[in-house]
Image (cartoon, rainbow, N blue to C red):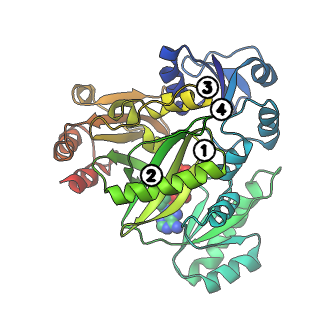
């Protein structure tokens, strides 16, 4: 089986590694260089994208920021999963919000902003602080602004104008003004839906972000009522999109009531723990779903924490004696995710203790959320 992945980053790399035992061969389309590459060795293939599309069995994506013309030709091939509609819903916050509202899925109040007048109306009508997000092209907290008081409205608007001017020209960019949610924590749900409609969902993961970037995800014991709430929303969204593949949903947990933050039509950073913590990892399950193979068990086999390695963070080799280290073979750069660590334990309490031990090997500056995650478990 040959699969073409749109995007050639770490998610494509980890799918290729997970697919190898199933004889699933992956080629990846690097959107930056516009070439087909091997997602692990980075070997550049001489064929172009059209050839790749015509000659693989299945096409999928590791990112949602895909040029409309590429999306169109992939969709027209009839072998693209989860497909254009799902990619657009995850890649454009306007479409995402409209979908969530249509399905009656709880999400933060918002207004769509196209110009300064809309912005002024939003500032006047919505409670502050508010979060302003670009409709597309944002990730890891980029393309986002926080407005705390009206006094900063002018400064933030000037910044937004600059961002809009630099934005993609083929599609109209909008800004979403969203109420600031006073959540007590963030959680996410990863699940897979197959071509015959069966669904397999992993346990909820608790996520700790620092400056809008995911730092630590912990999969430990969770409230069953919360899991049921999240699964019900997952099912509504996945069925409405006739979704095939792995879908991730990020939630705000507001005192036991979940509110969707955003959806990602792909494998997700908060699901990396499944490589060591679940029976079958998210990467393999995504491939199983898009290749019409039976879904694998999403059971958590042990509490696991995933810690992102970001920017120029260093990891002493001593960490390898207590945890699993996954490198992405990427050049270190400020804010860039270059690897992650999976730390496993027999129970929640021991996972908390192990996180404290791990913190002795790593610097607090480079891994700021480790002790927070440890305290949450104790
Ligand atoms: P990702 O890398 O997950 O794609 P992103 O840049 O697309 O991130 P969001 O997930 O929307 O953006 O926001 C990043 C983080 O900012 C959230 O995980 C959350 O911590 C915070 N945040 C976003 N929206 C809100 C909100 N309405 N209220 C409070 N905090 C928010
Ligand atoms: Mg997010």
**Going by the image, does 223 lie left or right of 126?**
left
Label 1 sits on a secondary structure element that is: loop
Return the mark for residue 31: none
Return the mark for residue 60: 4
> Can you say which quadrant of the picture contains the N terminus?
top right
Looking at marks 3 and 1 on the same chain, the residue that comes earlier in the sequence is marked by 1
Label 3 sits on a secondary structure element that is: loop
Label 3 crowd (10 A; few <14 / some 14-19 / many >=20): many
Label 4 crowd (10 A; few <14 / some 14-19 / many >=20): many
> Can you say which quadrant of the picture contains the C terminus?
bottom left
- Where is mark 3, residue-wise? 291
Tell me: residue 267, above or below residue 292: below
Q: CA distance from mark 3 to mark 2?
A: 25 Å
- Where is mark 1, residue-wise? 265
Q: CA distance from mark 4 to mark 2?
A: 22 Å
Out of 59 and 357, give the one closest to the viewer: 59
Q: CA distance from mark 1 to mark 4?
A: 10 Å
Q: CA distance from mark 3 to mark 4?
A: 10 Å
Q: Is residue 274 visible?
A: yes
């Amino acid at each position: 089986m040959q699969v073409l992945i749109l995007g050639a980053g770490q998610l494509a790399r980890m799918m290729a590694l997970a697919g190898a035992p199933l004889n699933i061969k992956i080629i990846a389309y690097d959107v930056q260089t516009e070439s087909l590459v091997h997602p692990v060795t980075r070997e550049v293939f001489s064929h172009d994208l059209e050839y790749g599309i015509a000659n693989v069995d299945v096409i999928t994506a590791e990112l949602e920021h895909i040029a409309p013309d590429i999306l169109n030709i992939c969709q027209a091939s009839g072998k693209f999963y989860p497909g254009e509609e799902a990619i657009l819903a995850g890649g454009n916050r306007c479409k995402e919000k409209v979908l969530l509202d249509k399905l009656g899925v709880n999400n933060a109040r918002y207004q769509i902003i196209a110009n300064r007048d809309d912005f002024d109306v939003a500032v006047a009508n919505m409670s502050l602080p508010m979060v302003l997000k670009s409709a597309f092209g944002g990730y890891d907290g980029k393309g986002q602004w926080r407005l705390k008081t009206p006094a900063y409205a002018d400064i933030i608007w000037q910044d937004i104008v600059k961002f809009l001017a630099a934005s993609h020209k083929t599609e109209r960019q909008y800004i979403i003004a969203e109420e600031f949610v006073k959540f007590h924590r963030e959680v996410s749900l990863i699940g897979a839906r197959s071509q015959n409609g069966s669904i397999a969902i992993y346990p909820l993961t608790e996520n700790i972000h620092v400056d809008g970037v995911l730092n630590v995800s912990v999969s430990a014991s969770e409230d069953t009522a919360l899991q049921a709430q999240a699964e019900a929303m997952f099912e509504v969204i996945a069925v409405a999109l006739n979704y095939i593949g792995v879908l991730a949903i990020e939630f705000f947990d507001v005192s036991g009531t979940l509110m969707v933050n955003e959806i990602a039509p792909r494998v997700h950073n908060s699901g990396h723990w499944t490589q060591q913590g679940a029976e079958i990892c998210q990467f393999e399950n995504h491939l199983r779903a898009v290749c019409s193979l039976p879904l694998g068990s999403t059971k958590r086999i042990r509490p696991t924490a995933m810690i992102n390695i970001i920017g120029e963070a260093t990891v002493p080799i001593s960490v390898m004696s207590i945890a699993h280290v996954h490198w992405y073979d990427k050049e270190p750069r400020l804010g860039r995710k270059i690897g992650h660590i999976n730390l496993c334990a027999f129970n929640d309490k021991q996972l908390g203790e192990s996180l404290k031990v791990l913190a002795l090997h790593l610097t607090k500056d480079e891994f700021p959320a480790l002790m927070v995650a440890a305290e949450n478990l104790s």
